Amino acid sequence: TIGEGGKRFWLYPAAFHGAWLNRRRVVAYVLILIFFITPWTTVGGRQTILLDVAERKFAIFGLVFWPQDTLIFWAFLLGTVVTIFFITAQWGRLWCGWACPQTVFLEHVFRRIENWIEGDGPKRNRLDKGPWNTEKIGKKTLKYALFILVSSHFANTVLCYFAGTDHVLAMTFQDPRGNWSWFLFMGFFNLMFLADFAWFREQFCIIACPYGRFQSVLLDKHSTIVGYDTARGEPRGVKRKSEKNTGKGDCIDCNRCVAVCPTGIDIRMGLQMECINCTACMDACDEIMLKIDKPKKLIGYTSIADLEGIKRQFIRFRTMGYLAVIVLVWSFGGYMAVNKRDLKLQLLRPPGASFTLSEDQNKVTNLFQAKAVNPTNKERTIKVVAPAGYEL
């Protein structure tokens, strides 16, 4: 997407239909629904997910985590990272194509709004290159108005995860000057979300996201990828129905796979960092294959081993190692979370003299500082009782 001189040229992916697109849409809409509904649900009297940075406590599915629970946090974080390693090594960039918020919102929300208002890729291209007439101004105004509306809803939902839905509802009907910090927080996310999906788009996957770089070390010959069957498709070229045994492959070089790609690559060039495994080229190629009476899956889910004619191994030492670490770390984190003490007491001697004596030296006084933390949602009453012969 970078032309001569470093200037960016815009992509206008063509519209397409197919079985894989329908499956991805179902997954995307379920994930979007979960994202917007979760802040409005509660578990154990608390918001299901509340990342209360101001109070230094995270409430996640009924469990409350404080700064003292750092070990549990790192266990779950390490488990999540290794899980990503395992999924990538086994199923490739499944996350990027099916569940990444960048892909989900861009392809299934913003791109659909754009197609509905301005038309498919070629029509949008002509509209952008055309003069600023009444039609263009009207379509652009409506499109960006809807973009801002969606971005605002997203930003306020993100705010609910950090400030709490009750607090957000209360602030909605207040003067923003009374909640400057939260208002700026929401405004920042609104601006970033709008800039990303209205302008930055595929550049995030190609330039900003580190996950694309990770795949070079996480993938191996047996990992699942979206690949082009070179042995079957080459040499490519247009064939007439009257032609028989021309020696050409099944690929007719229609470039349909390139036209629908959201990152602008040619999947026929092999595995590339820019490929997000979105399956768009698979649907587009299957559609062409049906039209020319050829088998589908010229482009499909495969592996480098399959393409090279090597027997694919689903069970490997590498993936089993990842799986063992995942089970170990998540089990440890789960055990620590379930067996957390529901009351934490800390007794410390403050800096200074260890003890003091009364004037008649008949009384020894020790100074201690007691600190109590209640990580539950229930009120607790603490009684401190001194043993006989001691004064508290």
Image (spheres, rainbow, N blue to C red):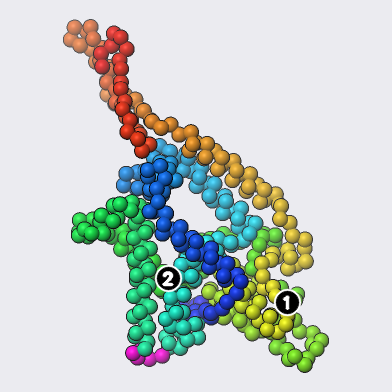
Question: At 50% across and 86% down in the image, what residue appears?
Answer: 122
Q: Is residue 92 visible?
A: yes
Dot 2 falls on a residue whose secondary structure is: helix
Q: Is residue 170 left or right of residue 107?
A: left
How many other residues sit within 10 Å of disc 1, few (<14), some (14-19) or many (≥20)? few
Which amino acid type corresponds to the residue marked 2 in the rendered image? Phe
Q: Is residue 307 left or right of residue 367?
A: right
Question: At 34% across and 60% down in the image, what residue appears?
Answer: 156
Quadrant of the rendered image containing residue 376: top left
Looking at the image, is mark 1 or mark 2 earlier in the sequence? 2
Determine the CA span between mark 1 and mark 2: 36 Å
The boundaries of the magenta stretch are: 130-134
Residue, disc 2: 197
Question: At 36% across and 74% down in the image, what residue appears?
Answer: 146
How many other residues sit within 10 Å of disc 2, few (<14), some (14-19) or many (≥20)? many
Relative image position of residue 81 (x, y in whole percent): 54, 51
